[in-house]
Image: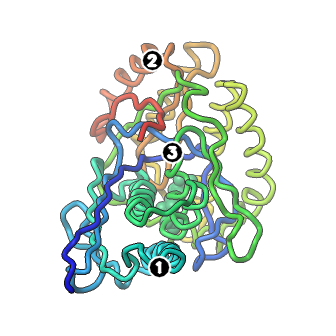
Amino acid sequence: MSDNTVYRASTTAPVNIAVIKYWGKRDAALNLPTNSSLSVTLSQKSLKTHTTASCSASYTGADSLLLNDEPEDIQSNKRTQACLQLLKRFRHDIEVKNPSAPKLSTMPLKLVSINNFPTAAGLASSAAGFAALVRAIANLYELPHTPTQLSLVARQGSGSACRSLMGGYVAWRAGTARDGSDSIAEEIAPVSHWPNLKALILVVSADKKGVASTAGMQTTVETSTLFKTRAESIVPQRMEEMEAAIHAKDFAKFAEITMRDSNSFHATCLDSWPPIHYLNDVSRAAMNAVETCNRKAGKLIAAYTFDAGPNAVIYYEEENEKLVAGVFRYVLQQVKGWEGEYGAQIPSNEQ
Ligand code: 2P0
């Protein structure tokens, strides 16, 4: 008997922006990090990946993915395969326990993903992308797993993706187990804990980034003399201080650690050989603008952070929006190369 039923589930996943950066792998195959990291999940109102997963016995051929209307080669992508195989195994376990459950794990999957922001421009597209992919398939398969349990799967697609399965303030614990079983993400505070914290995203360039994160990290791990100190001595203490700052809603402390950790990460990039440059003159103008905001206010009211690209994310509290927006408007209109802003993204876990 042929069955043409198409099973389908859709979901969206947000971008997250780290305030303690993940940079370096201790196990590239399992995608295990050398240090823990911590991020803020941004609103899905303007930065998100939307993914639909479907499967059917009537589908022919291999699993497929359309990303922004372009077919992606997922057969030779080990990371995507690792995620799909784990999720199919979880579904298979359900089918073994419940023989009347449809055998979704044996059907070809069709995945369709759309980003509403530049892909691979240092705006955490792989984070939202793999988080949406894992959650869409988990929904399709009706898996009972918690977001933290699914973070083990998403991590294998892209490290930072494990932090996009939760809203609010999310820690990715590096873990110590060799099989990665304790390298998981957990929400340390919900978005409602600090509702007036905002993030402004300055798009310096929507081009694809120069050095991809995975390759850049490996170069840093292998060649930077600063890296070991950062991973082993600096970040563990910063994680504790950052969690305390978030719990206390201590913006000045949050801002200091955020900026120092961004600078520390970019310092290890510059200390790599060959050196890796992600920041440019527009990024540095954004840093100066934050320093101007803080000088004008007489205290830390704004914080910058940069990922593997020149785009800036500026954190501030809502009551200081006028001052921050005013300084940025003034400074950036004098700088060539600034493409625009994504507006104020209120961190949110609405999903
Ligand atoms: C972060 N980044 O914590 C840091 C800051 C970039 C700079 O996570 O190789 O794309 O897929 O695990 O997750 C970017 O790294 O790397 C990243 P893979 P990913 O957000």
Horizontal side of residue 68 vs 241, given as left or right: left
Tell whether 119 sits left or right of 3. Answer: right
The C terminus sits in image quarter: top left
Q: CA distance from mark 1 to mark 3?
A: 28 Å
Q: Which residue is mark 1?
A: 85
Residue 283 coordinates in the image, percent (x, y):
44, 41
Q: Secondary structure at mark 2?
A: helix
Q: Tell me the quadrant of the picture where the N terminus can be found.
A: bottom left
Regarding residue 201, the answer to whether it shows in the image is: yes
Residue 186 x, y percent position in the rendering: 64, 50
Q: Rounded to the nearest whole Å, what is the CA distance between mark 1 and mark 2?
A: 46 Å
Residue at numbered disc 3: 17
Q: Residue at x 73, y 63 (%)?
A: 175
For disc 3, does the CB lie below 8 Å from ligand 1?
yes
Q: Where is 301 relative to 246, above or below?
A: above
Is the CB of mark 1 within 8 Å of ligand 1?
A: no
Which numbered marker is on residue 321?
2
Q: Which residue: 50% across, 30% down? A: 288
